[in-house]
Image: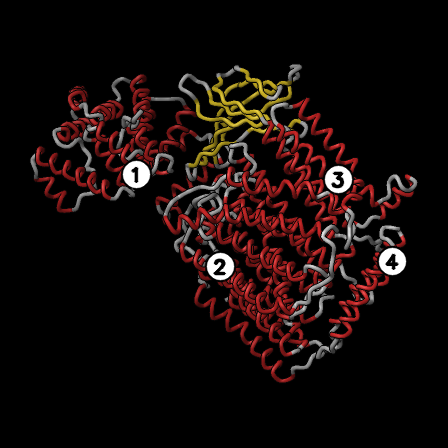
Amino acid sequence: MSIELGHFALVLTLALALVQTVVPFVGARIGSLSLMRVGEPAAITGLALLAAAFAALMLAYVQSDFSVANVWENSHSAKPLLFKITGTWGNHEGSMLLWVLILSFFGALVAAFGRNLPPTLKANVLAVQGLIASAFLLFILLTSNPFARLQPAPIEGRDLNPILQDIGLAIHPPLLYLGYVGFSISFSFAAAALIDGRVDAAWARWVRPWTLAAWAFLTGGIAMGSYWAYYELGWGGFWFWDPVENASFMPWLAGTALLHSAIVMEKRSALKIWTVLLAILTFSLSLLGTFLVRSGVLTSVHAFASDPTRGVFILAILVFFIGGALALFAFRAAALAPGGLFHPISREGALVLNNLLLTTATATVLVGTLYPLVLEAVTGEKISVGAPFFNATFVPLFLPLLAAVPFGPVLAWKRGDLMGAAQRLHFAFAAAVISALLAFFLIDRSSAFAALGIGLGLWLILGAATDLALKSGVGKVEPAAAFSRFRGLPLSVFGTALAHAGLGLTTLGVVSVTTLQTERILTMQPGQTAEIGGYTLRFEGLQPFTGPNYTEDRAHFVLTRADSVRLGEIISSKRLYTARGMPTTEAGIRTIGLSQLYVSIGDSTNDGGLVVHMWWKPLVTLIWIGALVMMAGGGISLFDRRLRVGAPTRRKAALAAASEEAS
Amino acid sequence: MLFWVLAALLTLIASLAVMLPFLRRRGDRSLGVEHDLAVYRDQLAELEQEVGRGLISKADAAEARAEIGRRILRLRGAGKADSGGAGGRSARAIAAAAVLAVPLVSWGLYAFLGSPGMPALPLQARLTIDPSQASLDELVARAEAHLADNPQDARGWEVLAPIYARLGRYGDAAAAYRRTIALTGPSAAREAALGEALVGEAGGIVTAEAEAGFERALEIDAANPRARFFIAMARAQEGNTAEARAMWEEMAAGLPQDSPWKEVAGQAIAGLTGSGGEVPEEPSEADITAAEEMTPEARQEMVEGMVARLDARLREDPADIEAWRRLLRSYVVLGRRDEAGEALERALAAFGADSKEAETLTEYAETLGVPQGE
């Protein structure tokens, strides 16, 4: 019965979403406060019903109820409990249900905590959210219903794709969706502002926390996806410029631009039209990502099942929302008054440069992702656009952006002084240049790119530290005073510094791995040793092992340091998931400091040997640590009180507590 | 019944949620302009603090203050009283329509999509169905559930393996035999049965892997009829009919009169004079009847005609990977290995050497032992 109740709750949510779309919108038109208010309880009740539907589906997975077609197709009674639970969203139908659950979660947050929003703006925002939810709920119910039943119920299920049977499935999709779908709020705010014909600094202040939260989640989601692919696929790569990865990277780039332009708009009332457009584009790219991944246009581990009607349906949703929002933009953008003026060399100017480079970079990724698809659709020719294309287009755009990042926070608003900013950064610059030279002469004299990249990464990290030091007045005032000023800095300043430093850490990791990693492929006999990255691996032999729903051959390696200290064992294995008869390779990874030793085994040879592929990946973990630091930066900024607009009655107390600074 | 009560309750809650704003007395007023003012006042306060900390010059601060002031003035100019909560009759009509829409849309759509009478059937419920009522699939599943908990139960695997093979689940059968061998050690019967399961998985072809299994069986018991039969079959599939016939004849001669293998070997020898045992393309009912009445020579001719037609079709339309497999297998069964190699090359050229299909076909050809270019 719980399944059918879940199904009914899902249908009921659609009815509520339709009400949430129409009633507040009409209320805002005719000026009825009561009608406008309907959106709030509708959004919150909708969330409760969807959560119940999701729980019902999850229960069916946990109990292996194969009378639900979706559970039968994607689960197996022998699967460990964790993967039964995560399997709920490890398939097309369930992941779409998670998508709308998160959409509805954000909508309910606006309804519950947006007390300070002007009523018409709030009503329009909830109406647009309701419209998005209605479209996707209709999509789920008509083309991908997770509650479709099977009669009679098969005794055993078809199991989940073994690659997805991993803790990564518990983290990566929910984080990624929190990011993707979080941008729907910025989109709804932009559409609502266009409907209202009013965009002002206050609007930017309300949009910024939503964008910031979505951006932080998306950063985490992409980083988790990258690490998962790195350890699960056994190729040792962290980024493949795969269309599915690009689909999540594009909203991230556009979202980063949005985050920065919203700052300009909030502080200086400039770039209004541009910010609204970016808010629309960012969510449009999220929708495009959903379309690319869910329609079956791309074949990948993410395309669970392709069904042409689904693709057409999502394409229709895509065209409706992107086209509708852009049409609204074309009609109403002229009505938005332009804002304050600024000199090209100023913090605004730096943020405009950031936006230009980021959007151009987004455009190159978009071209690289869509061109092969369009070409195949038009001429039938299959080409693949990979790393060489992106290295030639994306990297040259991104390098100047990275080099410019530390200047942004130290430039003054309105009219800045580039020489002054450069002087303030001289210490960071000198330190970065010296370390680049040291890297060149001491570590690797063959690669100037490695040295430049390491210098660039340090420049970002030290630049962020310099910004903090300057703002707390280090060198100008007494150390004790500087420390108390440091402690008094607003959280968003720390957020900015952390996010920029995180970017530097990721840059360091990427550069170090791509230029300095070493790789060996060899056939090893039991007892044989191999040297890599200054460590010695001894192959001990293969041993069979039986897991809950797989059997595997484990290759044991003993790791010793150059001074022959034993560092323990590395195990890499070849697994066979019995239900689908599908083999996977489990890489053996050992983290030493910030670097990793990565071992992946191949086939056995006839003479009892084993093909072993091993990599020494210096500083590789910095790639993901940097992303975590960026995420933390976003999170800390989010707790800055300035992002929460105090209601008039609470404002005094908030002001007394807040220590403010222009950043 | 309980389901309908709960569904009605959920509908009621949803409808009440829509009605909520109308049930409350409206006391508060719209605050649109006030809110914008709050933001600007915050900005002014921030500015003062920056001036106090010396982060911004006096001149810049004055300019910024002036700009914020201008914005506040602009806001005052645009400030209009929002129409509190009017709307009157039309608003109430819309509200009533919305409240009605909730049950109508939800019950209407659910009636169309749902299966309200269908009970949930979790694994536990399915497993406790009376065994005498259970189908073979269910019994197998129960055995699987038992073996999942007791993977060391060698006897269980040994019983399950031939059932798998009979159900056509050759891959599972092979895995179960392997498991048995790993747990209780090899025997001629087990090794031979493993080989037969592998033959079934390969669609009747004695692959190199299967042959290795039969060889192991013969090492333990040189007289094992199953292993001997399939080794001869392997020779026949390679086109070495003379050797195959000799092996089968020798095997039949050595077997007691009541052995079932004697008859099987006899049939195999009779089949040798024909095509080699396998019909390449699914023939029609009429073809089969015709083939049964044919002389061996005519039958051979018919089979070769089918293969030639398949070959010709693939020259014109090379996109069908299943047809390519059938063609490769047919050539191997007919003993025309060179032609199989040539067909493989054409297939690779058609799909592109780097394509997924090419990889699948190359692997398949390897299991058949088709000679490959280079």
Tag 4 near tag 3, CB within 8 Å: no
Residue pointed to by mark 3: A463
Tag 4 near tag 1, CB within 8 Å: no
Amino acid on which the number 2 mark rests in the picture: Ile
Residue pointed to by mark 1: B350
Dot in front, 2 or 3: 3
N-terminal of the two: label 2 or label 3? 2
Amino acid on which the number 1 mark rests in the picture: Ala
Q: Look at 38% across and 41% down and name the residue there.
A: B140
Circle 1 marks a residue in which chain? Answer: B
Whether labels 4 and 3 belong to a single chain: the reply is no
User: How far apart are the alpha carbons under marks 4 and 1?
Assistant: 75 Å
Tag 2 near tag 3, CB within 8 Å: no
- Describe the element under mark 2 as helix, strand or loop: helix
Whether labels 4 and 1 belong to a single chain: the reply is yes
Residue A362, x across and y down, in percent: 57, 49
User: How far apart are the alpha carbons under marks 1 and 3?
Assistant: 57 Å
Circle 4 marks a residue in which chain? Answer: B
- Describe the element under mark 4 as helix, strand or loop: helix
Residue pointed to by mark 2: A140
Residue A585 as seen in the image, left or right of residue B211:
right
Q: Is residue B5 above or below residue B81?
A: above
Residue B3, x across and y down, in percent: 51, 65
Q: Residues within 10 Å of mark 2 (few under 14, many from 20)?
A: many
Q: Is residue A377 above or below residue B202?
A: below
Amino acid on which the number 3 mark rests in the picture: Gly
Dot in front, 4 or 1: 4
Q: Look at 63% across and 23% down and name the residue there.
A: A445
Location of residue A606 by image quarter: top left
Rendered image: mark on residue B48? 4
